[in-house]
Amino acid sequence: MSVLGPEVHNELSQLLQALQSPDNNIRSQAEEHLQANWTGTRPQVLLMALVEQISATQDLAIRQFAAVIFRRIATKTRKNNQNEMVDMFLSIDKAEANVIRSKLLETLGAEADKSVRNKISDAVAEVARQYSDSNEGWPELLGALFQLSMATDSAKRETAFRIFANTPGIIEKQHEATVLEAFSKGFKDDSVSVRIASMEAFASFFRSIPRKHQSKYFSLLPEVLNILVPIKDSKDSDDLSKALVSLIDLAELSPKMFKPLFRNLVGFSISVIQDKELSDMCRQNALELMATFADYAPSMCRKDETFTNDMVMQCLSLMTDLGEDDENAAEWLAQEDLDQEESDLNHVAGEQCMDRLANKLGGATILGPTFNWLPRMMSSMAWRDRHAALMAISAISEGCRELMLGELSQVLDLVVPALKDSHPRVQWAGCNALGQMSTDFAPTMQKDHSETVLTAIIPVLQSQHARVKSHAAAALVNFCEEAEKSILEPHLENLLGNLFTLLRNDQKYVQEQALSTIATIADSAEAAFATYYNTLMPLLVNVLKSENDKEHRLLRAKAMECATLIALAVGKQRLGNDAMVLVQLLANIQQNITDQDDPQAQYLMHCWGRMCRVMESEFLPFLDNVMPPLLELASAKADIQLLDDDTQVEALQQEEGWELLPLKGKTIGIRTSTMEDKHVAIELLVVYAQVLKGEFARYVPDIMEKIALPGLAFFFHDPVRYISAKLVPQLLISYKQAYGPESNELRGLWNGTVDKVLEVLTAEPAIDTLAEMYQCFYESVEVIGKNCLNQEHMQRFIDNIQSAVVDYKERVGQREEDRDPNNPEDVEDEAEELQIAIEDDQTLLSDMNKAFHAVFKNHGPSFLPIWEKLLPTYENFLISPDPTQRQWGLCIMDDVLEYCGDRSWDYSQYIMQPLVNGCTDSVAAIRQAAAYGIGVAAHKGGERWASFVSSCIPALVQATQAPNARGEDQVYATENASTAIAKILHHNAQMVQNRQELVDTWVTTLPVVNDEEAAPYTYAFLAELMAEQNPAVTKAPDQMFIFVCQALETEALQGQTAVRVASATKNLIQAAGVDPTPLLQQFSPEATQIIMSYFS
């Protein structure tokens, strides 16, 4: 019986008809009417009317459409009586909601048509989600669903599990025995569709429960796996694919659940991959399942006796599945669209899986089984085998880098002959392998094998096949990107001669690739490219002057890129008048861009940036043309769509440049292409501000207000946030250079900036992004300088630090809780992920340290009263067993010592012992921080610290004598300890007993050649010893000369200090009659030139 009157249903029926009209105008008017007269004013009436339409009408299409509209309306949010935005069902009167829900469940149970019932089940799942998310009950739902799960109609039983899959929250709070029983029945159901639906529901349920509760349901896995074999035997690829997808979800969530049955599952999956009677998608899903185990449980895969061999064999087999009915590659060679989507093809799936296996299982596991096949495949008569072998080398080179580097000559012996293969696709694969190896094995490939690679690949540029020579040119991009100019110079003439020939090729894509390769070579060869400038630049100018027809737009874009990279390579002087010609051509092209999809627009942004770097201030007249389109892109808002149904989701999945995210039962589409353009535009604003300095100031206020500061909180795209964090301090620098450090203009800009920067420190949940925001903060503080923060700012800063430290401690605690020493496999599999998390935290702590440093440096003791509020935190960190925390605490105390003068003594009880202990810590970074702190106390602490720092001398000497003290990871600690001793000897000599003995020891701790901050103090003290003719230096003048030369060579010692030290050293060796000429022979000609510039 209908609750609503016939007039309501008549109106709604007409509206539903209009909403489905093929006429856009009618449909738009209906949407407006729906919102104005139903959704916005009486949603409860609309929802009830829709349910009654579903149950009452005989028209199948109307029933289905009414269910779709019901779900769409249900997903909306609306203000409740407290004026809060809440989900639709939570906003309407509870009694009315109960009636609608009851009617909806009644309709679900009564509906006979499966397609309509599925739409109703989607609506039920959405309503259930709203109650589940808000911890409100829908008591009748579970009973109705359990009744459905026992219905005689299998389609109805399937519906119950379909709802469980969409809203697992409704069962996760049930007693585990009830849940186990429900799923067990579903897995054993007579109907395959029900069994698969129950698998999908179980995977969804499993994802929703906490990790620590997952093991309660491991016992169901045998029943899950028992579903697979009968489906495979029936050869139903669609059903088997669905089942495999559910297993992939479970393997991601808890791979160790599969451990007892893993051998059986591997065997089954391999049999599916091998079975050519099944669909390609089904076979690829079986491959994906195995690859997922490699991703999430590599140790389990390594220990399985056949996993690696079987998977390598199947991947290689799939990789031979290409070029069907195209034996001589005629069709492949004739293709001009080289960007055709191939991700669903077997050979691509095989290649991608090999890449994942190599990266996750490692070279020690993968190389043996792979190279057991490759030589045989390379000598096979079948071109597909040779092609697969070469693509396998491309796929595994990144993951097997360390082991393959030692065998690079042998690998090249396999690959290089392929460039002369009789089949063009094998030649192409050979080029591909060399290109990938050039990236993965850089710079060894370039330094040790350039002759082999270049003499093999340059002749391929003359191939009779356009696709092959184009790919050879593409491979050269990879090689040349990582090559020093000295490696390329001997080959430039041969390389460029062949590439110039490609510019005259009939195929446009060949010309485009040739331009990209020439551009890369110009970028790497730098000034050496100038010889070829007169040959190439006129050609490029002609291309840019040519008619702007649609067919040649990408070619012109590549020509722009090439010309501007050449301009960067040869420099402003060589460019001469061509600079003006080039920017005028770019301006003309920009004026004629009208289509949104014109590729020239994006290339043009980068080209303007390059020309700015080349021309510097001479570029200013062109800014008025360049900035408007750039600012428009940089100001772009997020293009977001809320998708109501599967049709809209599927439509966007087919479009490039969209990312789809699930959110509370809905799907949100974000246009990523817009975000990427925004990122590039802001990146170029950074370039303009850096290059043009104060002359960019007129754009700064608008950019700061409308682009940079909003960009910090642009949560839709992290790269936009990162580059905005780089832009903020750069804009401040431009303004500072234009108006001066004390100007009202700069202060005004800073006052509008600092609050926003502090705000993002409060609201940022992502660790890596928070680190970027702290970097933005401290770089900005450094730009503005002294007393740039008021008391409120400093209080907000310390509050943000406190919040970040609390979160950090929680993450450390959670990692410790998750660590299970009883499962070494889990520890091993999660080691990489764990290391990334630890490194993210270390980066954050480091950037927080730098923020402290910037505040102390520019505010000194005035920061201490607010800083003190976290004193218990610093104290705990200083004595923590975690070296990261000890280092963090020491670095903060170092800043107190350096910038707070006598006031630092107030905290001596917290500082002294950690400094002494730190000098002998096993962690070099802590020794470095402790030594630096002692040196600062000697330099700036005054008399109160004198006794303490002199007592630290034995610990500092011990720090200089640590094992492998000059090793790459230890040398900074050693040099800081040496410098600290020098500071004590200089500033606190009166407290040092046996001074000469200590000086004799100190000289043996030299040289200091890495730490540019420490070196000036060290060598200034050495110059003092020379001036006083201390025996420690007069007895070894040649050694002192070498120490000084080493510091000059590395440029650790520069400026006026270097001049003074060199003068003292010159006097020393002259007085001793030492000839420096033989001593200089150990240095390179370039280093000798630098050294002699100070001694001449």
Image (spheres, rainbow, N blue to C red):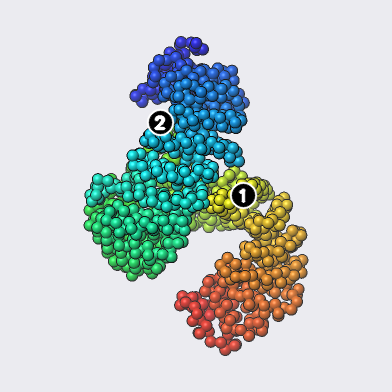
In the image: residue 531, left or right of residue 84: left
Q: Amino acid at mark 2?
A: Thr
**Residue 359, image x, y percentages:** 46, 53
Write down the residue under mark 2: 647
Q: Residue at x 28, y 54 (%)?
A: 383
Q: Residue at x 52, y 74 (%)?
A: 1049
**Front residue of 718 and 341:** 341
Residue 567 vertical position relative to residue 84 in the rendered view, above or below: below
Task: Measure how far apart labels 2 and 1 are at the Cα level.
Answer: 48 Å
Marks 2 & 1, CB-CB < 8 Å contact: no
**Residue 39, image x, y percentages:** 49, 22
Q: Is residue 930 visible?
A: no
Write down the residue under mark 1: 822
Q: Earlier in the sequence, mark 2 or mark 1?
A: 2
Q: Residue at x 76, y 73 (%)?
A: 991
Q: Which mark is residue 324?
A: none
Q: Amino acid at mark 1?
A: Asn
Q: Residue at x 45, y 77 (%)?
A: 1085
In the image: residue 693, left or right of residue 594: right
